[in-house]
Image (cartoon, rainbow, N blue to C red):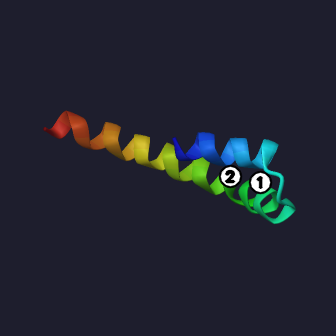
């Protein structure tokens, strides 16, 4: 959901500062999501 919000803000925000912030930090948010998914997959089989 956070990735979607950042993508939307990067595309559609009217405030240029908000748009720039979302655009600048979107790759980091995507990386964090990917890392979280990998960690979840690594931990789940152990349960």
The vertical placement of 33 against 20, above or below, is: above
Give left or right: position of 41 versus 27. left
Location of residue 26 in the rendering, given as x and y in whole percent from the top left corner: 68, 52
Farthest residue toward the bottom? 17
Secondary element type, mark 2:
helix
The vertical placement of 24 against 12, above or below, is: below
What residue does disc 2 label? Answer: 26
The residue lying at 80 percent from left, 56 percent from top is 19
- The image quarter containing residue 24 is bottom right
The vertical placement of 24 against 3, above or below, is: below
C-beta proximity under 8 Å, tags 1 and 2: yes
What residue does disc 1 label? Answer: 23
Location of residue 16 in the rendering, given as x and y in whole percent from the top left corner: 86, 60
Farthest residue toward the left? 47
The residue lying at 33 percent from left, 42 percent from top is 40
The residue lying at 60 percent from left, 47 percent from top is 30
Secondary element type, mark 1:
helix
The residue lying at 75 percent from left, 62 percent from top is 21
Q: Quadrant of the C terminus?
A: top left
> Distance from label 1 to label 2 (Cα)?
5 Å
Give left or right: position of 5 versus 14. left
Q: Which mark is residue 13?
A: none
């Amino acid at each position: 959901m956070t990735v979607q919000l950042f993508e939307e803000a990067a595309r559609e925000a009217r405030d240029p500062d908000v748009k720039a912030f979302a655009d600048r930090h979107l790759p980091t948010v995507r990386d964090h999501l990917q890392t979280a998914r990998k960690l979840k997959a690594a931990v789940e089989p152990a349960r």
